[in-house]
Amino acid sequence: MSQIISTETDNHAAEAAMREQQRIRVHYAEAPERFLAAWKRAVGIIGPEYFHCRASDDCAAATCREQLRPDADAIERYLGVCSVGQGVFIGAVVSFFNGDWGAEICSGFGYSGIGDIANRLDLVELEIIVELMMSHTGW
């Protein structure tokens, strides 16, 4: 009897492991598309003029994140006049492009930890950052 229970337990564990592996494969197969969609939402909030796409139509038509690279010079100029909330969101977003740069921006506005940053964002911004985190596979 204990052999039967052990075999059933092993089978359930193996099935659970296979389901988890499949879930992971699907997640990472869909990640680039989901990241791009979230990145486009972020670009729309921050402004296409701060990215290399330059215009809303160009941003909407982008098919890969490389077409939506942040324009460091434009962003750095904007950081001098934007609100703290905007600056923290920009820092959080660009950290997916360059972690050191994003951390420097957030720190410059007085926010250094992910919890601090999350507390500063509104719900839409927070949803975008969470989706970027969930679908980020590296720049």
Image: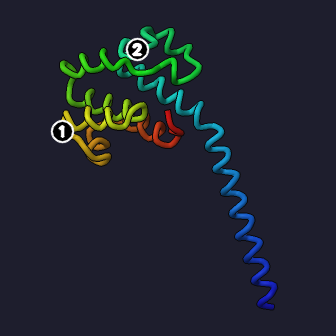
The mark nearer the N terminus, 1 or 2, is 2
Q: Say which element carries label 2.
A: helix
In the displayed structure, does residue 105 sit left or right of residue 1?
left
> How busy is the neighbourhood of tag 1: few (under 14 within 10 Å), some, or many (20 plus)?
few
**Residue that label 1 marks:** 110
Quadrant the N terminus occupies: bottom right
Residue 128 vs 114, above or below: the answer is: above
* Residue 50 percent location from the top left of the image: 36, 16
In the displayed structure, does residue 90 sit left or right of residue 107?
right
Q: Which mark is residue 93?
A: none
- Identify which residue is drawn at 20% across, 30% down: 84
* Residue 33 percent location from the top left of the image: 59, 30
What is the count of numbered marks? 2
Residue 6 vs 31, above or below: the answer is: below
Nearest the eye: 70 or 30? 70
Amino acid type of the residue tagged 1 in the rendering: Gly
Residue 11, quarter of picture = bottom right
* Residue 69 percent location from the top left of the image: 44, 21
In the displayed structure, does residue 4 sit left or right of residue 99?
right
Residue 79, quarter of picture = top left
Nearest the eye: 65 or 88? 65
Q: Which mark is residue 48?
A: 2
Residue 119, quarter of picture = top left
In the displayed structure, does residue 105 sit left or right of residue 7?
left
Residue 45 vs 99, above or below: the answer is: above
- Identify which residue is drawn at 37% across, 22% down: 45
- Identify which residue is drawn at 76% across, 84% down: 5
The structure's colour scheme is rainbow
> How busy is the neighbourhood of tag 2: few (under 14 within 10 Å), some, or many (20 plus)?
many
Amino acid type of the residue tagged 2 in the rendering: Pro
Residue 75 vs 58, above or below: the answer is: below
